[in-house]
Image: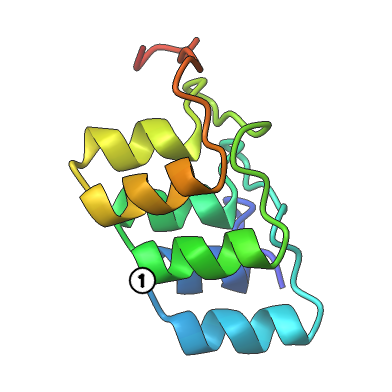
Amino acid sequence: AIACDGSTPLHLASYYGHIETCRALISEGASVGAMDNDGSTPLHNAAYRGAASVCSELIKRGAEVNSKQDVNGQTPLHLACEGAHEGAVRVILQAGGDLQAQATGAEA
């Protein structure tokens, strides 16, 4: 099921930090790389909210830490840093988050 904004149930579970729900959705075939209408992936949502354990789970299940930029040109690392979410920043960096990635959109 996809909402009018393009978000999937995994986007929502990631946003709210519900790790067990994320695991269940992924086990049933939810795409960790799905993008909503703003270009955000579930990893963007988890990073934005500072849900480090969800970030870790999504990355473990194949979420790409660097290749997806949202409508504002931001990677999950940008969003975790913007919110001062140290745990999420560490998880993303340990997974190879690009320290040199530059935001390209209006929020840059």
Image location (x, y in percent) of residue 47: 39, 50
83 or 71, which is in the foreground? 83
In the rendered view, tell whether residue 57 sits above or below residue 80: below
* Colour pattern: rainbow
In the rendered view, tell whether residue 8 sits above or below residue 91: below
**Quadrant where the C terminus is found in the figure:** top left
Q: Residue at x 64, y 34 (%)?
A: 68
Q: Residue at x 59, y 73 (%)?
A: 9
Q: Helix or strand or loop: what does disc 1 sit on?
A: loop
In the rendered view, tell whether residue 52 sits above or below residue 97: below
Which quarter of the picture shows residue 64?
Answer: top right
Q: Residue at x 69, y 61 (%)?
A: 32
Q: Residue at x 81, y 78 (%)?
A: 29
Image location (x, y in percent) of residue 24: 64, 89
Q: Is residue 108 visible?
A: yes
Q: Residue furthest right?
A: 29
Q: Residue furthest left?
A: 84
Q: Which residue is mark 1?
A: 16
Image location (x, y in percent) of residue 45: 44, 53
94 or 19, which is in the foreground? 94
46 or 93, which is in the foreground? 93
Which quarter of the picture shows residue 7?
Answer: bottom right
Crowdedness near tag 1: few (<14), some (14–19) or many (≥20) residues, C-alpha within 10 Å: some
**Quadrant where the N terminus is found in the figure:** bottom right
Left/right of residue 34 with respect to residue 89 in the rendered view:
right
Image location (x, y in percent) of residue 55: 47, 60
Q: How many marks?
A: 1
Q: Is residue 3 visible?
A: no
Left/right of residue 49 with respect to residue 7 in the rendered view:
left
Task: Name the amino acid, label 1.
Answer: Tyr
